Amino acid sequence: MFAGLLLLASPLLLTSPFVASGALAQAAAAKPAKEFSVGQSAARERQKKCGAEWRALSVADKAAQGPKWPQYYSKCVKRLKQMKA
């Protein structure tokens, strides 16, 4: 009886969204990556530099700089932009 249900359900399995999403994922993986613009790559570099600085800070330094990542990141980006200008 159970095998009969599997045979009846097999056409449904072929059209399931899970099977289709696997094919779409393979097609998306074959597509070449889009190049970043100059502004996007500069922002990415700033984020990496600020992240490395944040990870290097001690707990006391983090509290003095800004207790949370968003506040520290904002200050860091402003500082890096001023250094470049």
Image: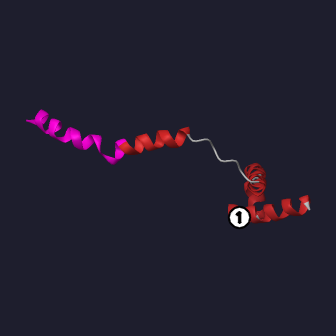
Left/right of residue 1 with respect to residue 84 in the rendered view: left
Residue 2, located in which quarter of the rendered image?
A: top left
Answer above or below: position of 54 versus 1. below
Q: Position of residue 16 (x, y in %)?
A: 30, 46
- Number of numbered tags placed on the structure image: 1
Answer above or below: position of 79 versus 55. below
Q: Which residue is mark 1?
A: 67
Check disc 1 and report its element: helix, strand or loop.
loop
From this viewpoint, which residue is outermost toward the left?
1
Q: Is residue 24 magenta?
A: no
Q: Nearer the viewer, residue 11 or 82?
A: 11
Q: Nearer the viewer, residue 43 or 33?
A: 33
Q: Is residue 16 magenta?
A: yes
Q: In the rendered structure, which segment of residues is drawn in magenta?
A: 1-19
Q: Nearer the viewer, residue 24 or 5?
A: 24
Q: Position of residue 60 (x, y in %)?
A: 76, 58
